[in-house]
Amino acid sequence: MLESENKERILRGIAASPGICIGKAYLVDREGVEVIPKYFVHASHIPQEIKRFQAAVKLAQDELRQIIEETPEDLKIHTGILETHLLLFQDKMLYGRTIEDIQQEGVNAEWALKKVVSEVKATFQGMADEYLKERVADIVHVSDRILHHLTGNHHVKIADIDKRVILVARDLSPADTSQIQLEHIKGFLTDLGGRTSHTGIIARSLGLPAVLGLSNATALIRTDDLIIVDGSAGLVIVNPTEETLVEYDERQGRYEAYRAQLSRDSHLEARTQDDTFIRVMGNIELPEEVVSVIDNGGDGVGLYRTEFQYLSRRDLPSEFELFDKYRDVVEVMAGRPVVIRTLDINGDKALQDANTHIEVNPALGLRAIRYCLKHPEMFKTQLRAILRAAAFGDVRILFPMITGMEELKEARRLLAEAALGLQREKVAHNPDIPVGIMMEVPSAVIIADQLAARCDFFSIGTNDLMQYSLAIDRGNRHVAYLWDPLHPAILRMVRRVAEVAREAGIQVAMCGEMAGEPIHVPILIGLGIPEWSMNPNAIPVVKRMVRSLAAAPCRDFIGEISGMTCAREITKLAWKTFGQALTGQPFAD
Ligand code: PEP
Ligand code: MG
């Protein structure tokens, strides 16, 4: 090993989830095989090397066949592309040429395959023909599958990790993160991803330190390397020196003491000094996280993201399975509100691994309410489960990604049908629950007054609202620098939604990540948004910030910033005006 490999190195990424952890790295390679070994094979071993390649092709084919077979009937429309992939395994361009290269150049199968794929890519690069471009993408998928079998480097199941480690991955899908066992995973790092990607959101709700968007952590870190993750600063230190270790050990202690102090008064109400009450609730992905909402002093579940019960499996959950989980959450919350959002699948939370690459632009594709309205039977199963759980407490239903009135009307029609079915079958349920819509697409904001006539509340989803109005892919680290909820356009939209709701006499809440940032507290108070929902771990600090402020100056502050044009200036002014309430120190420019 080279001496320099053991030198302390600092990597900088996006500070996605605060906290510090120190431990051994564990590499999970989920997105293609990054490092392909090259070696020469003795002439006498070439037939064996070809057989090794053919065996890997067979395994990859079998794996794909199994995926196709296990795809539920109503999703079979998506498997056409996989059938095409099956044919590609035997394609002359890929299969034939790889074997030729092994024979003629005497190289290992992985290297020969990689070379062939690079040549195919080079040949078709720059061609305008969309069909050919897609075929190249197909070849890459197929070859990745074969490579995984050749290198034996595939499908590390995160749920099976049984040591205390820090995960290092190219990317982690929601299906991966939903398998994380808190007793084994201390924190994680990824090459890709932005602050509002679901990987970041889940890290924050699990309370795990995380740095995302590091670009090449998987190339620079090896399994078992000692690393420090500083999720608050967005830093990773690889092979730290003794001195750095001591320093971070102390910092970790200080951070934990700060968290402990915050949680001691987290059960106090979030009421401003001039008596404005804010309901501060928690966002959950998994039913078990409801405990964290209670522990952190949450006044309810303001967003229950239900899609995670559909991930990491090939079949669909039954009505009873869903109802059982929803009821658990509702019962634990004991009368406090639970806002259950219907399935927000696809986009960045693909229903199945196999479907991930089917849509060219999944964020604008068949996701969320669109997907549900196309699969009414599947949707009604969930609606029935929600209505049944509503018999056990204060349940509200929330439809994601509404872009226009037709979707809202159709979703409501199916909800009414689900209620009627339950009534006919004499199954206990509550048909009369508040119906809300996510405000996360600009078109919905523009017609908010029309939509308000057909729903009981709005919940502002700043993560997607920013993605769609500022054109920032929320998972793309290259544009993460543009992410700023204090962009004047976002502030105007939030303000409009709040005003429309007030005029129409309906409720308004915010459940996007904007609500969980303490420096946004005075702005949300000033804009008159009375209910917020956030990562449970953010609740204590946000509640404390509310208690330290009065509402009147927050409203004045909105007047002050309404003519400002630059997000950075607004942020600076917010820190200057309210930073001391947060940090106890005057703001230093
Ligand atoms: C949002 O878009 O702001 C939101 C809360 O929903 P999600 O992050 O699940 O897309
Ligand atoms: Mg959203």
Image (cartoon, rainbow, N blue to C red):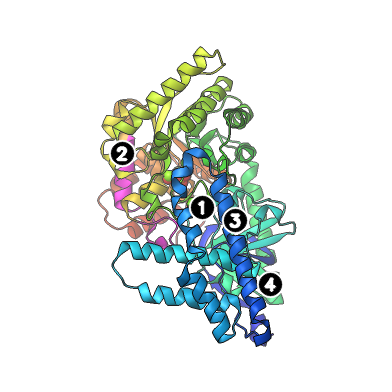
What amino acid type is highlighted by mark number 2? Answer: Ala
- Does the image show residue 53? yes
What amino acid type is highlighted by mark number 3? Answer: Glu
Q: Is residue 479 magenta?
A: yes
Q: CA distance from mark 1 to mark 2?
A: 31 Å
In this rendering, the answer to whether 311 lies above or below 19 is above
Residue 225 circle label: 4
Q: CA distance from mark 1 to mark 4?
A: 32 Å
Which circle's residue, 3 or 2, is located before the other in the chain?
3
Which circle's residue, 1 or 3, is located before the other in the chain?
3
In this rendering, the answer to whether 105 lies above or below 350 is below
What amino acid type is highlighted by mark number 4? Answer: Asp
Q: CA distance from mark 3 to mark 2?
A: 42 Å
Which circle's residue, 1 or 2, is located before the other in the chain?
1
Which circle's residue, 1 or 4, is located before the other in the chain?
4
Q: Is residue 480 magenta?
A: yes
Which circle's residue, 4 or 3, is located before the other in the chain?
3
Q: CA distance from mark 4 to mark 3?
A: 32 Å
Disc number lying in front (1 or 4)? 1
Ligand 2 placement by image quarter: top left
Residue denoted by label 2? 444
Residue 354 circle label: 1
Q: Is mark 3 within 8 Å of ligand 1?
A: no
Q: Which residues are magenta?
A: 472-498
Q: CA distance from mark 2 to mark 4?
A: 48 Å
Residue denoted by label 3? 63
Disc number lying in front (1 or 2)? 1
What residue is at 42 percent from the left and 41 percent from the top? 368
Left or right? Give the position of 20 relative to 557. Answer: right
